[in-house]
Image (spheres, rainbow, N blue to C red):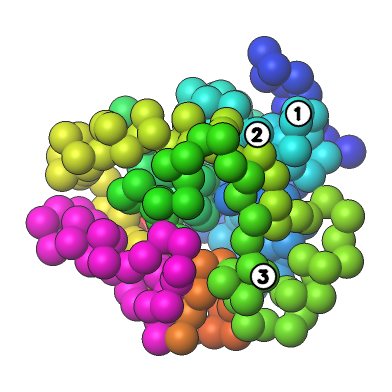
Amino acid sequence: MPFLEHPKGRAYYRHWPAPEPRAVVVFLHGFGEHTGVYHRYGFALNAAGIDLWAVDQFGHGLSPGVRGDFGSIDDSSRLAETLTEIAEAQRPGLPLIAQGHSFGAVVTLARLLDQPDRYRAGVISGAPLIPIPELLDTDSSFDLDPHWLSNDPFYLDLLENDPLAFTDADSAPLARALDTAWDRFGHDLPKLTVPTLAVHGVVDPIAQIGAVRAYAEQIEALQIKEFPGGGHDILNDTMHREVTDAIIAFIDERC
């Protein structure tokens, strides 16, 4: 089992290798997930000649930590940095794409702002770009209705029966980490220069689409692709094939 080293502990990661890759995606998942829920996405990218590398963030999957506690934005960014270095060593010279979902999207945007020359492009989904009311009270727990995430029966069954997936946890650590990003985005996000695609469900009740639309209107590098009927976990919703096709087409344009 592959693990990468981090000051907080050894984090588990997965690699879905394409036979003859032409690009590399480095992916960060969101709250309650782990890398294993993205195998369908990984195989679809592989069929298009794209490598997928993903890491179980702290407090998730097979990585250590308190359930649901990612740590800081910097902790997650360091995971992505180490994973990027591993991917670069195994796939030298290939274009790098930074991708993240939900909390992972927030970390990905921070990395694209901090290292604009590192990645050829970025992809975000379910990105919470403004404060989420349910997380403003740091004394409460975060308890998600699975149907807020997806209407795909396969994915809902996975959430119910996968012992590594969950929809509830103490929200205080997540709120603290997101708060630092929200403070920054209002000032820095309009400075984004790396071409970035936001795929977003129109009926996402957690990270509502309005904020992403507003930022896309004012940021030339940010484009949005909307999916009617899509919930928060758009990569694992009923229209996941269309979402993946849009991402592949975007990567094709950039690589």
Region of the chain picked out in magenta, as a range: 199-228
- Check contact, mark 1 vs mark 2: CB within 8 A: yes
**Could you say which disc has been placed on residue 65 in the image?**
1
Rendered view: 1 above or below 15: above
Closer to the eye: label 1 or 3: 3
Q: Secondary structure at mark 3?
A: helix
**What residue would you read off at disc 3?**
146
Quarter of image, res 124: bottom left
Q: Most extreme residue toward the top, as rendered?
A: 7
Locate the N terminus by quadrant.
Answer: top right
Q: Position of residue 157 (x, y in %)?
A: 81, 75
CA separation, marks 2 and 3? 19 Å
Q: Which residue is disc 2 drawn over?
A: 69
In the foreground, 141 or 28: 141
Disc 2 residue type (three-letter): Asp
The residue that appears at 74% across and 75% down in the rendered structure is 156
